[in-house]
Image (cartoon, rainbow, N blue to C red):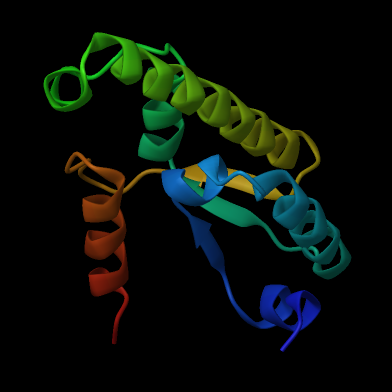
Amino acid sequence: MNLNTITKDFKIFIDTCVLMHPHAENFFKSLKKSLLLNQEKLYHHLSVKAQLHGLAKGDAQKNNIEKYGQYKAEKIANQKAVDAKRGEKIIEEFKEEGCGQGFKTGKDIGATDNNYVALFTQYRH
């Protein structure tokens, strides 16, 4: 199965992690072509954008400071900030080109994964 078939026959939802993958730009460049060809969109819950925005600040997380120490925790946070900014850019490019769309569920229940589980459970049948 290729991307053109997938984008034609299925709705594609993304989470924060896939946008922060080191090779995300290459994947999404190919995906964008298929979405535009099939006049479809890539969907993300608005909590994805909020999470990326928070990670893009580059603040070291308390649990990483306790686990690795301040220096390594800051290195991790800085890398996550770079990855998150790249993810924000991807979302914005898709939106600007008409092949990306954010959405929210009726009730935001926190973490992106929880929102997706609620959405997919609602439409399961």
The residue under the point 74% across, 35% down is 93
When the figure is inspected, residue 19 is found, relative to residue 14, above or below; the finding is: above
Quadrant into which the C terminus falls: bottom left
The residue under the point 30% across, 19% down is 73
Quadrant into which the N terminus falls: bottom right
The residue under the point 72% across, 56% down is 27
Count of numbered labels shown in the rendering: 0
When the figure is inspected, residue 36 is found, relative to residue 99, above or below; the finding is: below
Q: Position of residue 100 (x, y in %)?
A: 66, 47
* Relative depth, front residue between 80 and 111: 80
| Relative to 30, 64 lies left or right | left
When the figure is inspected, residue 101 is found, relative to residue 116, above or below; the finding is: above
| Relative to 56, 95 lies left or right | right
Q: Position of residue 115 (x, y in %)?
A: 26, 52
Q: Position of residue 98 (x, y in %)?
A: 76, 44
Image-quadrant location for residue 66 = top left
Q: Position of residue 101 (x, y in %)?
A: 59, 45
Image-quadrant location for residue 118 = bottom left
| Relative to 101, 47 lies left or right | left
| Relative to 17, 34 lies left or right | right
The residue under the point 39% across, 27% down is 50
